[in-house]
Amino acid sequence: MLPEALFNETRLLFHALKHWAEALHEDLGLTAPMRAVLELLLREGPRTVPEMARLRGVSRQHVQQQVDALLERGLLERLGNPAHKRSPRLALTDEGRALIQNTRARELDVLGRMQVGVSDHAAQEAAHVLSAWRTALRKDIERRAE
């Protein structure tokens, strides 16, 4: 039996997290998609737009829109790419790195003060369950693409 309730709650949680983060960081003018690009580059290091799109499972055009806005704000910089002259690698600037690190610290501070009524162990188990489903879904996508 598919865990329909789990999937429904996951979708609702995704949207709640998006709205919560946008409200919390309203003063920064940072949208959820822009933030996703910054976080990816913080975690993975310099990447091209096509690489970021594949890692995030979204279109190249969607990532390009976010990258253009982040470049304009001075939060990203273009680096050379010897493997492909027309697709530069993109990296966080010092300002971009500071912004995403401060954003994450702000969130952790607020989350740490929330009373959720769930033990740390239960939260860790929930993360494990979601990770297992994400892995299974990605494998199914890859299988279908073959």
Image (spheres, grey):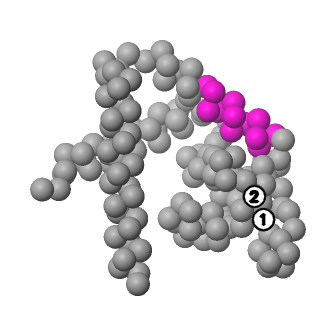
Q: What crowding class fits label 1: few (fewer than 14 Cα within 10 Å), some (14-19), or many (20 or more)?
A: many
Quadrant where the C terminus is found in the figure: bottom left
Please, is residue 130 above or below residue 57 in the view?
above
Relative placement, left or right, of 138 versus 88 is left
Q: Which contiguous range is marked in magenta?
A: 95-106
Relative placement, left or right, of 94 versus 136 is right
- Magenta stretch: dominant SS? helix
Please, is residue 24 above or below residue 131 in the view?
above
Question: Which residue is situated farthest in the left direction here?
Answer: 1
Q: What crowding class fits label 2: few (fewer than 14 Cα within 10 Å), some (14-19), or many (20 or more)?
A: many
Taking the spot 68% from the left edge, 67% from the top edge, the residue there is 49
Taking the spot 31% from the left edge, 22% from the top edge, the residue there is 118
Residue 62 seen anywhere in this rendered image of the structure: no
Q: Which residue is denoted by mark 2 in the rendering? A: 46
The three-letter amino acid code for the residue at tag 2 is Pro
Relative placement, left or right, of 47 versus 83 is left
First-in-chain label (2 vs 1):
2
Mark 2 touches mark 1? (CB < 8 Å): yes
Q: Position of residue 63 (x, y in %)?
A: 62, 63
Q: Which residue is denoted by mark 1 in the rendering? A: 89
Q: Position of residue 133 (x, y in %)?
A: 33, 54
